[in-house]
Structures are given as structure tokens and as C-alpha cells.
Amino acid sequence: MSTNPIPNPNPGLPSGAPARGEGGLAASGAHRAGPPQEAKVEASAKVLAELVHAQRQLSQVTHELSELKARLSRRGHQMSVLQHVAEILAATSKATQVADVVMDVMVQEFGCKRCVVWVLEDGGVAFQPRSGFGMSRAEWMELRLPAPNPFPDSPVVLYQNQWLENELPNRVASKLKQDSKAQLFFVPFENQLLVMGFAILALPGGHQWEEEDFEAMSILQRLAAVSIYNAWLFRDLSEQRDTLQNQALALEKANSALRDSDRIKSEFLALTSHELRTPLTGILGFTRLVMDGLYTSEADMRQMLQASYSSGKHLLELLNDILDLAKIESGKLEVRCEPISLYLVVEEVRPIVEAYPRHAGVELIFPANLSEIPEVVVDPSRLKQVLLNLLSNALKFTKDGSVELRVERGPGVAMLHVTDTGIGVSLDAQERLFQKFIQAEGGHAREYGGTGLGLVICRHLMEMMGGKISLFSEGPGKGTTMTLTMQIS
């Protein structure tokens, strides 16, 4: 059986070759489809890589934004804290309060484990610790440091923050360091090139400062320095104010004393004029009577002359008081001390005092045990002057009762007591009785005469002889005791 071959539709192609429009074309189409598919894959891979890169950049930006947000939050917190601190410090006038506030901020905001704040004090010669954390008060109070350089043996730059390595004295480092790994950071408070104080912080090893921490620390430093400086100014102004007030009070007291002195001197001049005129008038009067022969007998004449002599003697005593006071105030009065028996002094004084005028019935009592008292170191003539003055006053101010002289021995001293039962002295008058021109009773109409200089002169004389004089009275009408104390030879 014969078969007829299928005619070739493409005479130009060999028999059996795929036709263009069929298998050949399909194969050709499949061959051309390969490259576009690979391009798509490459494009997809590229897009994917770009997406991954973008995702990484986004994550990085997100992380940076998160860090920035945290830093901004911390900075905002620090600025809020610093603003609050500035308000507190503006109302603070004491350096110790400034130190407390600064230390609290450093502990809470910068995480230090130990901290001490020093302030320049003692007239600028020392830095005194004023606040501490992480140790007892007794420990940090011992850490006083010299000024202006607290570390004279180390080249520490005092005007900038820095880590301290070996600059601190051993006693300071040992107090501040909790362990060998701790780091010490120096924070000065500088104002107008003067270190007003500083803080030293003990921080954990490897501690790193952030930029915002440094900025906050810088602001805190300036606030602390200005506040301490203002506290200095406030203290100086307070001291100047107190000084001015004290000076004003002193001036007022001085003016009051001057007014009193002027008044007393005026009274003294008037009184002295009267006191001097009285005996002088008596002298002239009795002398004129004798000169004119106005007496009836020789005894009458002798009585007039005796009265004239007594007046002259009284006048001399008044003048001697005035001259003695002038010598005392000018420093020209001299005493010559020597050992002497009180028995001899009293025996010389006795007849003179017994001749003094006194009220009827007033008993004059002298001691009987003088031989038992050892010698005393005095100027004999000046002691007699003092004793006569005291006994004369006692007789003058005693209307009834007695005036007694007693001797007493104490440890290394002998004491003479002149006790009377007279008018006494009030407590307020006792305080001013040893002032110039003062008597227990003031005014021109006093019952008792005198210049008011006697006790002042007696006090000066006793002090110049190494002794003292004192007065005791329970009050008006209860008598007075004057005591002379002298050193035993």
C-alpha cells in the first residue's frame, strides 16, 4: 500500500523542520521569553533590597528620634529642676543653704554615691565643708581645705571641671572613695575669677558624662557661684548694718554720757563754789572779828581763831581732793608702797578721827586685835588718806548708832571694814557712787556737803596700791559697810 507524502508548505525549509508558525515559531518565542523574566526577578530583588535598606534607615531614624526624645525629655527635666533650684537659691541668703541645695541636685540628678560641697569662708583663707552625702557629718566636717588652692601639692586647674586622679590629699580621698574603682570628679563654683567653693563627686568607675549633663552642670555651677557670692555680700551687709547699729547705739550712749557729764559738771561747779565759799567765808568772818577786837575775852578770841583754823583746814581738804583728781586723770599721781603695820596706821588715824565732828550719841569703835594682822604693802600716807575719808563720810552720814572700824584677815590679804548705821545707799546709787562728782543724794539742796570726789579718789588710790575698795548696803536707812582689801607682805 503506497502512501502519498504530505506536501511541504514551506518549500524553502527542509522536510521535517518545524514550520515558522508552529513548532519553530513556538520555540523561537520561548527562546525570546527568557531575558524579560530574569529582568523582573532582578528588579524585584533590587526593590526588595531598597525596601530592606529603607527599613533599616527607618529603624535607625526611629531609634535616633527615640534617643533624641529621651534626651529632650531629660534636658527638659533638668531645665525644670534648674529653674526650681534658681528660685530657691534666689531666696537663700546663707552659704550653707546653698551648699545643701547644690548637693541634693548632684545626688538626685547625676547619680553620685558620695558628695561633699565646700564653701570659701574664714575670711577667704580656707574652704569649709558645708554639706555632705554618703558619709556621716562628723566625717565630712573634718575635711577642711586651704584656700585659694585646696590642693597646694598638685597642679589642679581650679576653674574647670575635671577628673581627679591623685590630686586629693589621702584623708579626703579615703573619705570620698567607697572602693578603688570609684572616680572623683571636681566641680568648681567660680565667680569673677574667684573660686567661691567647689564640690567633689564620687562616681562609679567608667561613668560617662552626657552632653546635656555637662550643660546642666555648667548652669548649676554658675547658679551656685553667684548664690554663694550673694550670700557673702548679704553677710557683709548684715555685719556692716549691725556694726552701724552698734556704733549708733554707742554714739547715743556716748552722747547721753556727755549730757550727763555736762549736767554733773555743772552741778559740781555750783556745788564746789558753794563748798569753797562756805569755809572761806568763815575764815574771813572770824578773822575780821578778831582784827576788829569784837571778842569779850581771850578764850572767846581763841575760839574764833579755832573756828577759822577749822574752816581753813576744811577748805584745804576740798582743794586737795580737786588736785588729787587732776593728778590721777593726768597720770601724775604717784604712790610708794612699802610693808607697814596696820596698827601704826590706825593709831595715827585714831586721834584725827576722834576730833571729827559727829552727831551726839554716835559711838566711834576701833579694833583691838591689830597685832594679829601681819604687815601689808601700801603707801602709808595714801592709806591714811583713804581711811580718813571713809571714816569722815561714815560720821557725816550717821545721825545715831555707831561707826566701827574692823580688821579681818583673808587668804593673802587683810581687810579693813568701816561699818556705820547711817542713811545707807540704794542699789541703783551703789552702781554709780564711785563715779566722779556723784553722791548718793543729788541736787543743790542736799543735806550733806562734799564734792563727790572722795570715793573716786579712794578707788584710784587703792587700785594703784594693788588693792581694792568695795561697798555694801542693804538699802536706805540700813547702814553701809566700806571694805578696803590690801595685799599682805
Image: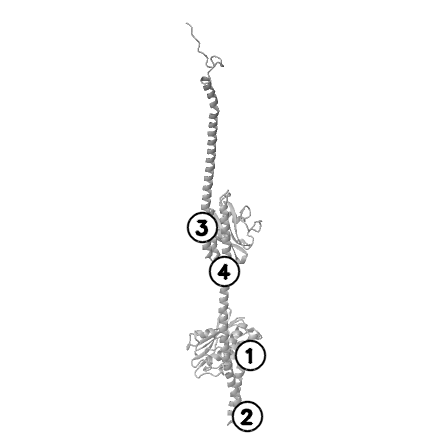
State the count of labels.
4
Q: Of the numbered discs in the image, which one, if any, rests on residue 80?
A: 3
Per the image, label 3 sits on a secondary structure element best described as helix
Spatial CA span between label 1 and label 4? 51 Å
Q: In the rendering, at what x and y percent does residue 124 appear?
A: 54, 57
Q: Of the numbered discs in the image, which one, if any, rests on residue 235?
A: 4
Above-or-below relation of 408 to 124 = below
Spatial CA span between label 3 and label 1? 80 Å
Spatial CA span between label 3 and label 2? 109 Å
Q: Name the residue under label 2.
A: 291
Q: Mark 1 points at which residue?
A: 323
Asked if residue 134 can be seen in this view, the reply is: no
Q: Which of 367 and 397 is in front in this view?
A: 397
Disc 3 marks which amino acid? Ser
Disc 2 marks which amino acid? Met
Tell me if label 3 and label 2 are in contact, CB under 8 Å. no
Tell me if label 1 and label 2 are in contact, CB under 8 Å. no
Q: Residues within 10 Å of mark 3 (few under 14, many from 20)?
A: few
